[in-house]
Image: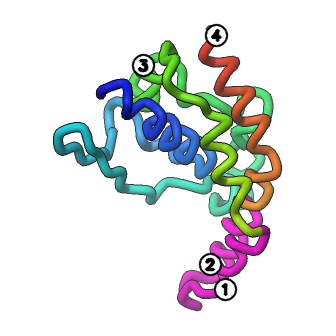
């Protein structure tokens, strides 16, 4: 991707990290590309901390915890943008984090309230997780910047 796309790739990487989309990986990118533009799809395996069975939740690390950021590690599970983002001088993860921080505090709960009833309590759990993630987003950026130094 051209350099002018690095910032949007960084925003996408931060988004996937926050929502725990560990399924977007080199072996399964789920990215539609046309020229320099791209669209991301397939978020069915997100929010493990919020939606996993209760007996699995203790084993799912949030991205702001020690060892919680893993989508930069080389191999099939590496995020498809990481190889570009790691060395890039054209991406500022703090700028991407500011977008999240500017969201009104009730954004996620409003979405959860508007979700179809058959989706159940998972929407409230996801809303709570996202609210917590935004509170810890600076820690996620620090972890990403640390991974860039490895």
Vertical relation: 145 (above or below) 136: above
Contact, mark 4 vs mark 1 (Cβ under 8 Å)? no
Label ID, residue 149? 4
Q: Which residues are magenta?
A: 105-129
Vertical relation: 24 (above or below) 78: below
Residue 15 screen position, x and y as percent? 55, 47
Instruction: Report the Cα–Cα distance between label 3 and label 4.
Output: 13 Å
Q: Which residue is mark 1?
A: 113
Circle nearer the N terminus (3, 1): 3
Instruction: Report the Cα–Cα distance between label 2 and label 3.
Output: 33 Å
Q: Which residue is mark 2?
A: 111
Left or right of 75? Residue 149 is right
Circle nearer the N terminus (4, 2): 2
Q: 70 and 87: which one is in front? A: 87
Magenta-drawn stretch contains 126: yes
SS of the residue under disc 2: helix
Q: Quadrant of residue 55?
A: bottom right
Label ID, residue 100? none
Vertical relation: 74 (above or below) 4: above
Circle nearer the N terminus (3, 4): 3
Q: Residues within 10 Å of mark 3 (few under 14, many from 20)?
A: few
Q: 110 and 46: which one is in front? A: 110
Q: Residue at x 35, y 30 (%)?
A: 26
Q: Residue at x 48, y 34 (%)?
A: 7
Q: Residues within 10 Å of mark 1 (few under 14, many from 20)?
A: few
Query: Where the C terminus falls, by quadrant?
Result: top right
């Amino acid at each position: 991707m051209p350099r002018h796309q690095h910032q949007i790739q960084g925003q996408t990487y931060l988004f996937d990290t926050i929502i725990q989309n560990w399924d977007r990986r080199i072996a399964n990118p789920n990215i539609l590309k046309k020229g320099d533009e791209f669209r991301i799809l397939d978020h069915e395996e997100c929010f493990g901390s919020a939606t996993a069975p209760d007996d699995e939740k203790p084993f799912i690390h949030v991205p702001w915890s020690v060892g919680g950021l893993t989508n930069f590690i080389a191999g099939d599970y590496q995020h498809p943008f990481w190889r570009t983002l790691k060395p890039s001088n054209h991406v500022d993860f703090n700028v991407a984090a500011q977008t999240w921080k500017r969201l009104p505090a009730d954004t996620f709960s409003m979405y959860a309230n508007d979700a179809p009833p058959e989706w159940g309590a998972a929407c409230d759990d996801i809303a709570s997780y996202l609210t917590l993630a935004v509170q810890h987003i600076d820690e996620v950026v620090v972890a990403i910047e640390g991974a860039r130094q490895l």
